[in-house]
Amino acid sequence: MKQLDAEILENRELAENYFELFLRWPEGVRVPFPGQIVSFRVESGTSPFLRRPFALASFQRETRVASIIYHVRGPATERLAQKRPGDVVDTLGPRGFYFQVEKEHRPLLVGGGVGTGPVVFAANWLASKGYEPHLILGYRTAAAFPKLELGPLVRLTVCTDDGTRGFHGTTVDFLGTLPPSDREDAFVWACGPNAMLKAVHEWSFPQGIPCKVSLEEVMACGVGACVGCTVETTDERQMVRLCTEGPVLPSEVIRWT
Ligand code: FES
């Protein structure tokens, strides 16, 4: 993990209150992988805002441009939405455990809301390795569906709660419609609201489909000191800190409540 002054290249509105922020990734900073996060100090100097973690949504090796997808839902993200090309943001990263390929070969990537970025990153990354990922994204309504850049091997299914676009229902409702041939040799990576992650776990685990999830918690210190980002686990650790032992974890390790 490194501290870097990342130059903003673009701050693009993708959908209502959803933005994608593109950053120049300096030479010498480790290449990030899907599931990893960066944390921004949104304001410098005496700002009251703590560092905010954001999951990476893309990284282009050739141009060294990275991006995050974020939702404007408070003062810090409102400030972020005001950033313009040429502005510099104090950034820590990349950090955290990332999604790693399983021995299974059929990727099912499930995301929703701010969980869109990491699974889009994962889908494009897997496609660049020759996989044919099925990306399943869920939103309340068609207006929330962001414009995305996807590789040609990525198969996209959009689900909306109100049926205004794609499949009418949740991502987990859609998973339930997959024929056995689509579940065979599958693995799941998921990111989004906790209720969705729990439902994805409850769908995949009984079928023996390996599932990894990227959890979101507020991270105050971001370095393992404040114990503010812990989740309970079913293993001997009993608890892990997402900032140092996550954010990506096997779903069966989490004590879902
Ligand atoms: S954010 Fe402080 S321990 Fe994780």
Image (tube, helix red, strand yellow):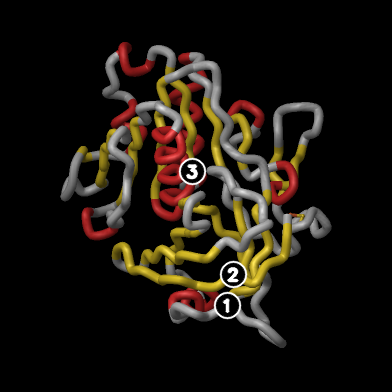
Residue occupying the far bottom of the picture:
46
**Under tag 3, what secondary structure?**
strand
The circle on residue 191 is 3
State the CA–CA distance, disc 3 to disc 2: 25 Å
Which mark, residue 88? 1
What's the residue at 72%, 65% (across, down)? 3
Q: Around disc 1, counting alpha carbons within 10 Å, would you say few (fewer than 14), some (14 to 19), or many (20 or more)? A: some
Looking at the picture, how far across and down is residue 96, in whole percent? Answer: 67, 46
Looking at the picture, which amino acid does disc 3 mark?
Cys
Left/right of residue 249 with respect to residue 222 in the rendered view: left
> What residue sits right under mark 2 in the picture?
6
Task: Please state the horizontal and vertical placement of residue 97, each as a whole percent of the image.
Answer: 66, 41
Q: Quadrant of the N terminus?
A: bottom right
* Residue in view at x 39 percent, y 33 percent: 127
Amino acid type, mark 2: Ala
* Pointer 1 with pointer 2, Cβ within 8 A: yes
Earlier in the chain: of badge 3 and badge 2, it is 2
Q: Is mark 2 within 8 Å of ligand 1?
A: no
For this orientation, the residue located farthest to the left is 164
Question: Could you say which is closer to the camera, residue 170 or residue 27?
Answer: 27
* Gap between marks 1 and 2 measured at Cα: 5 Å
In which image quadrant can residue 232 be found? Answer: top right
**Which numbered disc flags the more N-terminal residue, 1 or 2?**
2
The amino acid beneath tag 1 is Val
Residue 110 figure quarter: top left
Q: Residue, x 37% and y 30% (percent of image)? A: 133
Q: Looking at the image, can residue 178 be seen?
A: yes
Label 2, residues with CA under 10 Å away: few <14, some 14-19, many ≥20: many
Q: Nearer the viewer, mark 3 or mark 2?
A: 2
Q: Give the answer, above or below, for where 80 lies relative to 65.
A: below
